[in-house]
Amino acid sequence: MNFCLRVGFRYFRSGGSQILLSIASVAFGVTVYLFITSLIFGLQKGFIATTIGNSSHLTLLPLEPEVRTFSVGDTKVVSSVLPFNEREVTLRSYLSVIRQLEDIPEITTICPVSAGSGVVIKGGQNRPVSILGIDEGRGSQIFGIGRSIVSGELDLSGQSCCVGSELARLLGLKVGDKLRVLSAKERVLVANITGIFKAGNINSNERLLYVSLANGQRLNDMVGAISRIESQVTDPFLVETTAARATLITNLKVQNWKEVNKDLLNGLAAQSQTTNIIRFFVLILVATSIASVLIVSVLQRSREIGILKSMGASSLALQGIFTYLGMLVGVSGASVGVGIGGALILGIGEIPGNSSIKPGYLFPIEIQGGFLGEAFLVTAGIATAAALLPARRAAQMNPVDVIRQG
């Protein structure tokens, strides 16, 4: 153990209540740092899981018709635009498109969808719905239907269907009931309710009706065709690269989830920036706590500093003593904060409640081992850096003036 560290450790042990209060301040700062980081991470993880985990990352749609023009002098004139009701809104060669998508390794799940509108009729009551014909297995993976079933089971075989919990409440439906479905194409299906699901928002629970792909195609007058192809990828945040490749291979319109959820991404970015600002001020609190204690310590030990310098201790050695002292305070406070604060936050995260982001718990806290290591290293580093100013002040003291003034 060198001279600077030995003297710094002696000052640390004899610091009394000042050092203890400083360690407590650092520990409190680490606890706040961990709580804010874990809470925001949990919120973002919940939002992403709700928005991305139970939805499509890539949607392939029919190409929109191009506007054809010809020039008359310097004027461009529209030659032909198909009326909206004559445009192609279905994918007829979707099986070959699916095979093309299966060659892209980043795409994990592919589901053809036949979508249309209609009404459901039960006991003289009717409600408008969006009819989604899907492949049961693939659709459940993308839309998370199986995970959101609250009554019955996901079974779309035969004439079966699954309805949302709000639609079931409005029409008094339960598993096993028969439901008459009338599509906008004037096709009728008498379906048996096999499952009731509860999605993340009330509109989905009130409007969505899931049937098999074959029934969806028949109801929406799309026999042999579909509305779109939904898919998920391995890394949703790198979806643009996969979207560009899918566009090149299929020559279809490819829409990724980031284009649809720009407001969500902006909100998450603003949330992350707010978190960084809070964490910055927490670190400022830690730094000022360390610096203030060390400045007082320098003033209290000014006579000792003068004696040390008169005995030959260099300015660099004195600066090292108080830098080590700040490091010891920071490491001690960070250790206490990571230990006690981490355990406290884990306990808070287990409090039962009705959080919509993390069902069954009051706070959507997600703490990871990396957060503990990050909090320890950052806090210890900030504490050591905060000690440089008082350490430099100690090093600049004139031993003659200090001893003369007593």
Image: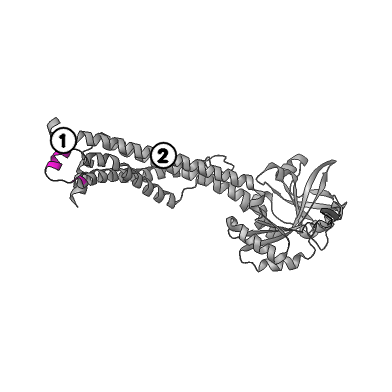
Q: Residue furthest right?
A: 186
Q: Residues within 10 Å of mark 1 (few under 14, many from 20)?
A: many
Badge 1 vs badge 2, beta-carbon distance below 8 Å: no
In the rendered structure, the answer to whether residue 95 lies left or right of residue 70 reads: left
In terms of depth relative to the viewer, which is nearer, 243 or 226?
243
* Coloring scheme used: one colour
Main SS type for the magenta part?
helix
Give SS at disc 1.
helix
Tell me where residue 203 sits by quadrant.
top right
Q: Which residues are magenta?
A: 304-315
* Residue 146, position as x, y percentages in the image: 66, 54
Q: Is residue 358 visible?
A: no
Separation of marks 1 and 2 at Cα, in angstroms? 34 Å
Closest to the observer, 116 or 75: 75
The residue lying furthest to the front in this view is: 73
Horizontal placement of 133 versus 288: left or right?
Answer: right
Name the residue carrying label 1. Answer: 303
For label 2, count other residues whose C-alpha is less than 10 Å away and answer few (under 14), some (14-19) or many (20+).
Answer: some
Q: Is residue 309 magenta?
A: yes
| Location of residue 26 by image quarter | top left
- Identified by mark 1, the residue type is Arg
The quarter of the picture where residue 280 lies is: top left
Residue type, label 2? Val
Badge 2 marks a residue whose secondary structure is helix
Mark sitting on residue 282: 2
Considering every residue shown, the one lying at the far top of the view is 405
Q: Nearer the viewer, mark 1 or mark 2?
A: 1
Please state the horizontal and vertical placement of residue 180, each as a whole percent of the image: 83, 49
Badge number at residue 270: none
Instruction: Provide residue 171's location: percent of width, then percent of height.
Output: 78, 41
Q: Position of residue 209 (x, y in %)?
A: 75, 50
